[in-house]
Structures are given as C-alpha cells and as structure tokens.
Image: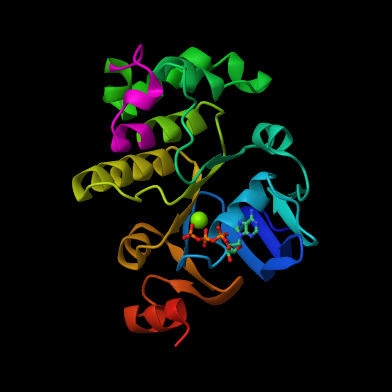
Amino acid sequence: MPEGIALKVTELDVHYKDFQALWGVSLQVLDKEIVSVIGANGAGKSTLLNTISGILKPTRGTIELFGERIEGLPPHETVPRGVTLVPEGRRIFPRLTVFENLFMGSYVPRTRAKRNETLLKIYDLFPVLKARQDQMGTTLSGGEQQMLALGRALMSDPRIILCDEISLGLAPLVIKSIYRQLARINGDGVTIVLVEQDVKRSLKASTRAYIMLEGKVVLEGNHSSLDEEQVKKAYFGI
Ligand SMILES: Nc1ncnc2c1ncn2[C@@H]1O[C@H](COP(=O)(O)OP(=O)(O)OP(=O)(O)O)[C@@H](O)[C@H]1O
Ligand SMILES: [Mg+2]
C-alpha cells in the first residue's frame, strides 16, 4: 500500500443475519485528511464505522489501517492500532464522573504513560470538561456530553478517529465550536472520518466526501468537484 494512506476499505459487505446492510463499500482516507461519509437515515453509515472499529464483522472485503489488515479484529485490538470510534449517541458511561469517563479511554497500555499529558490537552480543547471533571458524565448537557465522548476517544491517542453524527441534536453554536476543535485535532495530525447527515456542514469541513445510499457508495468527490445539487440527488437516490 502506498505511504500516506491511513485507511483503505475494499469491497466491504456487512450483514445483520439475513439482511445485507453494506454492499461492496470501498473508500480510502489519506493520512491527516478529513473525509466525510454522508447519507440519509439507514444508508449504512454507522454500520460502516462500526465495522471499521470492529464492533461488527464484515462478511466480505478488507480493511487496512496504515497498511495493516484489521477487518474482523474486535475494538480492543483496533484501538491500540490507532483507530477510535466516537459512537452515535455518545454512549457516556453512566455512574462514572467526567474524569472517570475520560480515564476509561486510556486503557490501552501504550497510552497510559502519556495519560496526564493527553488529559491536559483535552482539557485545553474543552475547558468545560475540566470545570466539570468530578460531575457524573450523564449530568452534562448534550453538547458537553459530545465533547466528553470526543475527549474519551482522544485519550486512546488515536491516529484516526471515526465520528458518528457528532452534531446530531446540538445547537448551531455548539456544533460550530466542536467543529473548530476537530480542526485543531486534525491540525495535530489526527486523521478524521466524519459521518453526518448534514450535507452542507460536512462538505465544508472535509477535504473529500463519500455519499452513501442504501448500503452503497454512490458518489465521491472533493469540495469543489461535488456540487450541492448532485450530492442531494445522490443522497435521496433521485
Ligand atoms: N442491529 C441491527 N439489526 C438489523 N438491522 C440493522 C441493525 N442495525 C442497523 N440495521 C439496518 O442496517 C441499515 C443501515 O443502518 P445504519 O445504522 O448503518 O444506518 P445509518 O446510515 O447510520 O443511519 P442513521 O443516519 O439513521 O444513523 C438500516 O437499514 C438498518 O435498519
Ligand atoms: Mg447511524
């Protein structure tokens, strides 16, 4: 695999029992790129991210992370290799404080030594998490919980983060602030895959985008090559 490719997904099929959710999905993400995967409800976006992170196993196809095959490996083996999911719906651990939630993100032995340093970086990105570090995670507002989910992912010192609908249900100002921090995280060398339903925002934030429809990639391009009308048509399958 040529140098500079962070993630390469080739001809991926994923089934939930008899139901096929992904059909020959292929995509490529360059090191330090921000790539969007856009699609309507049920297009297969979460299935794709969950398969990359190892929550689901593909029935066909390969996934390469910096040249190493990872398809079928469970999350506790993909996370140490540098890929971390920020899951849809945030999945904050109940009964744990903000600090403990963050701490849970650094269970990978490689990252333990750097734990305090990483924590300071996250508190610098999201000062509100520091201010509320002793509060139960689930008492945070929606936007703060999203910051916590992102911070927890960063605690594993990832080379690539997969963000599943990070802006869902949040106020425009909060979304703006989270996207600003994502740009900083990317500036620090972290590759980002953004799954979004918001076409405009994700096109703006990313270098390239893939549009999914009914389990397939139907369109691919960069900001300037994709016009919004074309994307909308692919998005709705019209
Ligand atoms: N656990 C499951 N069992 C059976 N089918 C599932 C399961 N999870 C998802 N699916 C189906 O797989 C397809 C893709 O779902 P997926 O959650 O990946 O879509 P999505 O693009 O993330 O949608 P959304 O934008 O609503 O989150 C859908 O048709 C969904 O009903
Ligand atoms: Mg989803």
- Count of marks, rendered view: 0
Q: Position of residue 68 (x, y in %)?
A: 76, 47
Task: Out of 89 and 184, give the one closest to the viewer.
Answer: 89
Give residue 80's quadrant in the image: top right
Q: Is residue 6 left or right of residue 212?
A: right
Q: Position of residue 169 (x, y in %)?
A: 31, 49
Q: Residue at x 25, y 42 (%)?
A: 177
Q: Residue at x 40, y 62 (%)?
A: 197
Give residue 144's quadrant in the image: top left
Q: Is residue 109 left or right of residue 207?
A: right
The outermost residue toward the front is 18
Q: Quadrant of the N terminus?
A: bottom right
Residue interval drawn in magenta: 132-146
Q: Position of residue 127 (x, y in %)?
A: 27, 23
Say whether residue 137 is magenta: yes
Task: Out of 59 and 204, give the one closest to the viewer.
Answer: 59
Q: Position of residue 64 (x, y in %)?
A: 72, 53
Q: Is residue 222 left or right of residue 141?
A: right
Figure check: 80 above or below 69? above
Q: Quadrant of the C terminus?
A: bottom left
Figure check: 209 above or below 236? above
Q: Is residue 11 visible?
A: no
Task: Out of 165 and 18, give the one closest to the viewer.
Answer: 18
Figure check: 184 above or below 165? above
Task: Out of 59 and 61, give the one closest to the viewer.
Answer: 59
Say whether residue 106 is magenta: no
Q: Is residue 53 visible?
A: yes
